């Protein structure tokens, strides 16, 4: 058996990488799971592990070579197996012989999927739907619990707004939250402010499942899992690691996991699994003095929450003038999926959880 070592997608915006170091030479015996080649991207230095045990038969991309995502870096053969001296390694020629639609090939490249791994009937042509099913089953994509066919006014809105933008039509609402209780808990328990927003958003997504969805092929797909991505800025770029099943975790556990993935992001050690499967994203710029901003939706999610800095403000409570710590929250949402009123109710639910 011959197995290709390909370049995986390591971040949301990654399109290519550079081979920086081969740990093994051609003809070397390798074990499954051991680091075999180091690649460098604009954001991270990453070791690619051997997918199988065997012999490194051929290095296709030598050190210093730039390669695109999903391109072949090298060839592994089973030990003792006879392989032609010059195996076919031109990936484009090889893929062209696979019966697959152009849309299926494009989607497979975007997700670093080998079309040979997709199981279909002999002689059948791989379609885009085949690739989508493979992604949902094998690539940790959140499971769909419900499909809503876009009909009537919802379909009209989707069609009109899609024409006005090449990507999701963005709309934004802003709301202020009283952070008195959060500030107190932050000081007592040493829990980061972002952790509170993660937990509050996760609870609100239970109340408003439409916000935990995606849109594809004229269908709104409401997702079963609540996985909160947190935008983390590092010297190497922006990463969005994901806290899986955030609704099922305590605020303390959320804080611990957030601290761990933040450190890994800054060290460039996040795994693909830790950066995949998100259903909703939070980005906090409060620590940079920003009070309000419009974040861009992290596709294919339905919305993203922007968090501004906490400031003391004069407010009226029980007919009395008081000074309270408040924060501005900005919710950017995909107007094809949700309208302003349900989005406002969702944001108000986050506000309620933070304040109570």
Image (spheres, helix red, strand yellow):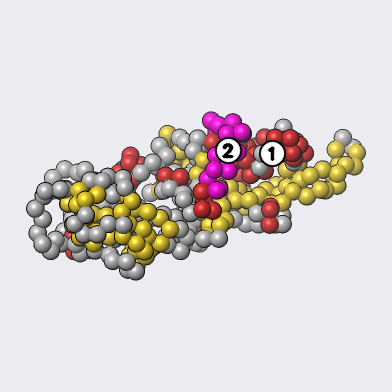
Residue under label 2, please give it. 256
Secondary structure, mark 1, is: loop
Residue shown at the point (47%, 36%) measured from the top left: 225
> x and y percent of residue 119 in the render?
21, 43
Residue for badge 1? 190
Residue 187: x, y in percent? 74, 39
Binning the other alpha carbons within 10 Å of mark 2 as few (below 14), some (14 to 19) or many (20 upward) gives some
* Residue at (66, 49) in percent of width and height: 307
Our reading of the magenta stretch's main secondary structure is helix
Left or right, residue 337 beside residue 185: left
Q: Is residue 93 left or right of residue 193?
A: left
Picture layout, residue 192 above or below residue 284? above
Q: Can residue 229 be seen in this view?
A: no
Q: How far apart are marks 1 and 2 (CA)?
A: 11 Å
Is residue 262 visible from the viewing direction of this image?
yes
Q: Residues within 10 Å of mark 1 (few under 14, many from 20)?
A: few
Q: Is residue 187 or residue 210 the one in the foreground?
A: 187
- On the image, the x and y values in percent for residue 1 come to 15, 48
Does 262 appear in magenta? Answer: yes
Per the rendered image, the range of residues in magenta is 247-263
Which comes before the other along the chain, label 1 or label 2?
Answer: 1
SS for callout 2: helix
């Amino acid at each position: 058996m011959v197995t290709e070592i390909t370049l995986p997608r390591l971040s949301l915006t990654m399109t290519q990488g550079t081979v920086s170091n081969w740990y093994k030479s051609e003809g070397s015996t390798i074990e499954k799971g051991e680091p075999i080649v180091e690649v460098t991207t604009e954001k991270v230095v990453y070791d690619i592990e051997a997918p199988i045990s065997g012999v490194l038969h051929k290095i296709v991309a030598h050190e210093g070579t730039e390669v695109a995502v999903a391109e072949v870096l090298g060839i592994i053969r089973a030990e003792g197996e006879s392989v032609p001296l010059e195996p076919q390694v031109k990936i484009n020629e090889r893929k062209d012989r696979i019966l697959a639609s152009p849309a299926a090939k494009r989607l497979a490249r975007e997700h670093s999927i080998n079309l040979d791994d997709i199981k279909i009937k002999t002689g059948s042509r791989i379609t885009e739907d085949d690739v989508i099913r493979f992604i949902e089953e094998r690539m940790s994509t959140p499971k769909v619990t419900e499909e809503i066919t876009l009909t009537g006014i919802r379909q009209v809105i989707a069609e009109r707004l899609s024409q006005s933008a090449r990507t999701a039509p963005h709309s934004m609402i802003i709301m202020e939250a009283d952070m008195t209780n959060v500030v107190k808990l932050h000081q007592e328990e040493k829990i980061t402010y972002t952790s509170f927003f993660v937990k509050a958003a996760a609870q609100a997504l239970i109340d408003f499942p439409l916000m935990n969805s995606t849109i594809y092929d004229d269908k709104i797909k409401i997702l079963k899992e609540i996985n909160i991505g947190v935008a983390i800025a590092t010297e190497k770029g922006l990463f969005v690691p994901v806290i899986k099943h955030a609704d099922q975790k305590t605020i303390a556990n959320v804080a611990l996991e957030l601290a761990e993935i933040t450190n890994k992001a800054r060290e460039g050690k996040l795994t693909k699994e830790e950066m995949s499967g998100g259903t909703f994203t939070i980005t906090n710029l409060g620590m940079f003095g920003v009070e309000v901003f419009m974040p861009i939706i992290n596709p294919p999610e339905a919305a993203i929450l922007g968090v501004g800095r906490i400031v003391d403000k004069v407010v009226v409570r029980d007919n009395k003038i008081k000074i309270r710590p408040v924060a501005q929250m900005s919710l950017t949402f995909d107007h094809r999926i949700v309208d302003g009123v349900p989005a406002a109710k969702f944001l108000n639910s986050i506000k309620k959880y933070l304040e109570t």
